[in-house]
Amino acid sequence: MFYNLIYFNEDLYDTYYTFANAGQAVQFTEIESQTDKGGQLGFNDTHVGLGRSSVIKGEIINNAASKLISLEKSLVDNDFYVDFESGDSLRHIEDLSRRMIFKATLPLVIHDTFDMYDMTRLMKDELERAESISAKPDDTELSNIDFDKIKLPVYNAQMEKVIFSKIHKNCLLIEENEFDELGEDNIILAKVKKTYENQFILFDPLKDLINLNNSMRKELEKSIGNHQSLAPITMTAEAIEIEIIAIYS
């Protein structure tokens, strides 16, 4: 089994791996192997001589791909998990309820009106302006805000219900010039977060672009007015909001 990982949210992995294993999950950091007989233990081109009571220790290699495989194996027999890759019709994804986890081939696109660089530039300008004319609410250090940890609005509108999410930029394992790969027939592993009947906000820069406290958000809401580039991206449709754990091919 070989995965070409495009996106992996390790925080969500930690959460759902623990739930899936019902408190029995163990994170191995080291293994110990002991032999009662002499011999040679080979690792590729390296050979280690072992005595009658030799002990060899090593750390578990636990990268993103191995974690994803472990999570999928632990989900197989859980009632809250649906694998649309195993033959179930993808149209039934629209019947999933909140908190269900599923795996499916689902191309995703970033909304056309989302301009990450324009939004971050305008947001920085507004933050600097607000900082210069008033005291920083709750002693917030605006200069320390990490604009690399932003979220990107992605969605699929190929079915009766729009499937959408906000993925974390720092969880992407591809470069920015490769974002088009999200629109290919990749497999996603995700949890249903919420459903919407008529209209939903795909992305709100003041809430989703960076983390702001309530005081600063209210200040910015007043200052940006009708600034179109920082207005929420709203879509009219039935929709399912999901939290994406992994995207891979």
Image (cartoon, rainbow, N blue to C red):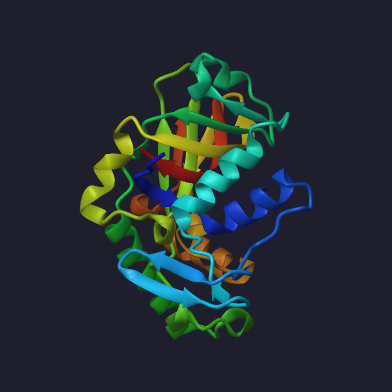
Res 137 quadrant in image? bottom right
| Residue 237 visible in this rendered orientation of the protein | no
Pick the residue in front: 38 or 3.
Answer: 38
Pinpoint residue 120: horizontal percent, then vertical percent: 34, 64
Question: Does 227 sit left or right of 84 as displayed?
Answer: left
- State which quarter of the image contains the N terminus: top left
- Residue reaching furthest left? 177
Give the image quarter of residue 40. bottom left
**Which of these two is toward me, 245 or 109?**
245
Q: Position of residue 82 (x, y in %)?
A: 61, 26
Q: Quadrant of the C terminus?
A: top left
| Left or right for 149, reference 75 | left
Q: Is residue 97 visible?
A: yes
- Residue under the image location 54 percent in, 28 percent down: 239
Q: Position of residue 18 (x, y in %)?
A: 70, 52
Task: Identify which residue is drawn at 69% across, 31% down.
Answer: 77
Q: Is residue 87 above or below residue 205?
A: above
Left or right: 160 in relation to 128? right
165 to 175, vertically: above or below: above
Q: Residue at x 52, y 45 (%)?
A: 69
Front residue of 64/130: it is 64
Residue at the (45%, 51%) spot, across then down = 65
Q: Eyeballing the image, is 139 above or below 200?
A: below
